[in-house]
Image: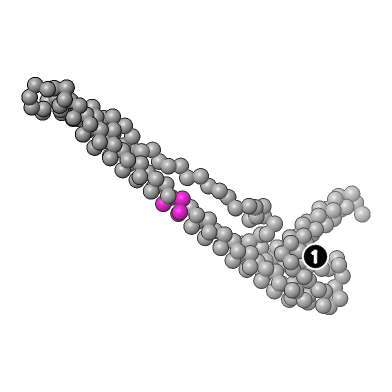
Amino acid sequence: MQRGAHVLIGVFASALAIVGSAALAQDMYVYPAKGQSEQQLSTDRYECHRWAVTETGFDPIDVGETGPPRAVRVPVPENKATGATGKGAIAGALAGVVLGHGDDKLKNTAIGAAVGAAVGGAVEANGEMKAQDQARDEAQQRADDMKRTKAEKSMRRANYRRALTACLEGRGYTVR
């Protein structure tokens, strides 16, 4: 045999080992019911794996299909009403001076500032609550998407296993 052929056989054997370990990782037991050799079992497993991937679009060897659950940080959007308390106090103070009756401009300014700050504070707090509600809604949407994706992957994994089992059984193996 030529040196290139040895390398090719080594690569093929490595691929078979990977596919075999992926199938074993799924607790799949394959019995050669018609006395197939270990070499034939490896070849059939590989070919059935490729067929099952083509049929289902799911490859359990694909690194993107495994891993721990992801945590996604959802930032709270900027409060567009930030600073409304200060702006309200200034506007209220000015209104107190201009609209106030009598000679006590300082008292009218203080009352206007207090009322303006209270109104501005309410506006600012409302803006913060809206921003938090928006972030909470986005986080819930992302969580729902992640659950849906997980359920879809689980279904695709089950479809892959059924396809792999059907292929191997079609080649004369008993699969559990």
Report whether 84 appears left or right of 100.
right
85 shown above or below 9: above
Q: Position of residue 135 (x, y in %)?
A: 42, 47
Image quadrant occupied by the N terminus: bottom right
Please name whichever residue, 47 or 82, is drawn nearer the observer in this view of the structure.
82
Q: Secondary structure at mark 1?
A: helix
Locate residue 166: give its quadrant: bottom right
Task: Give residue 47's position: percent from left, percent from top.
Answer: 74, 65
Q: Amino acid at mark 1?
A: Thr
Q: Is residue 77 above or below residue 102?
A: below
Where are the magenta residues, as a range?
A: 137-141
Task: Give coordinates of residue 110: x percent, y percent.
Answer: 20, 26
- 43 in magenta: no
Q: Could you say which quadrant of the image residue 174 lies in? A: bottom right
Residue furthest toward the right? 1
Q: Is residue 67 above or below residue 102?
A: below
In the image, residue 140 lies in the stretch drawn in magenta: yes
Secondary structure mostly seen in the magenta stretch = helix
Q: Which residue is mark 1?
A: 43
Q: Does residue 55 appear in this view?
A: no
Work out which residue is located at the far left of the displayed protein and give it: 102
What colouring method underlies this structural image?
one colour
